[in-house]
Image (cartoon, grey):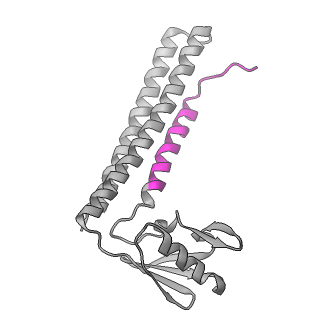
Amino acid sequence: MATPTFDLADIKRRMQGAVNSLKHDLGSLRTGRASPTLLDPIQVEAYGAAMPMAQVATISVPEPRLLSVAVWDRGMVSAVEKAIRESDLGLNPMTEGQTIRLRIPEMNEQRRKEMVKVAHKYAEEARVAVRHVRRDGLDLLKKLEKDGAISQDDEKRQADQVQKVTDQHIAEVDQTLAAKEKEIMQV
């Protein structure tokens, strides 16, 4: 079995993956503004299987508070409409031929605060993921040092680098959360 080696680039990549996942999750959170990613979590029952909305329709934003869903197959319009109604997004689809229009209603203060709580939960999950990557990196460094593959000074120096990278990614998570929170609370 090959001896494991320490790769800071891999740790950075894994931490960035956690941040990217957070950005994707936050993108699907409803704010007062229309966003095509709002419909990402919705699965449509199509051709005997559950498919993502993006695979059966084109989603566009013609106005700041309006989503337009152009369904490709005329027979799928009712299934798409049903999927939107049954989602917990609180949207009311209006069908015009093969196009479904979704007016994004204003969110009240209570709903905004709920969304902020969800955003905080997503951010905490991202922070935990980043910390797990840090722990994995530090554990590997300790193992390498214990096995004599690297010196104690190298282990300390690389552990400091891992901590620095961790701090950068946690800061990025916090910045992303702050921006999303501001967007949600904007009236």
Query: Residue 139's spot in the image, x, y percent?
Result: 53, 20
Residue 156 at least partly seen? yes
Along the line of sight, which residue is nearer the eye, 161 or 32? 32
- Magenta-drawn segment: 1-25
Quadrant hosting residue 115? bottom left
On-image quarter of the N terminus? top right
Specify the farthest residue to the front: 86
Q: Is residue 71 visible?
A: no
x and y, in percent, of residue 25 in the image = 46, 55
Where does residue 91 sit, x and y in percent of width and height?
42, 75
Please give the name of the residue rendered at 35% of the width and 70% of the height, measured from the top-left corner.
Answer: 33
Residue depicted at x 39% and y 42%: 124
Taking 126 as reference, is 61 above or below it?
below
Q: Main secondary structure of the magenta part?
A: helix
Residue 7 spot, x, y in % from top left: 59, 28
137 lies left or right of 23: right
In which quarter of the view is residue 51 placed? Answer: bottom right
**Is the residue 29 above or below the residue 84 in the image?**
above
Indicate whether residue 27 is drawn in magenta.
Answer: no
Q: Find out whether residue 6 is within the magenta segment.
A: yes
- Residue that protrudes farthest toward the right in the picture: 1
Residue at the (28%, 61%) spot, across then down: 112
- In the shown orientation, is residue 145 left or right of residue 88? right
Q: How many badges with numbers are in the image?
A: 0
Residue at horizontal 46 percent and vertical 45 percent from the top: 19
Say which quadrant the C terminus sits in: bottom left
Q: Nearer the viewer, residue 53 or 10?
A: 53
User: Which residue is the extreme one toward the bottom?
Assistant: 97
In this view, the residue in front, 145 or 139, is 139
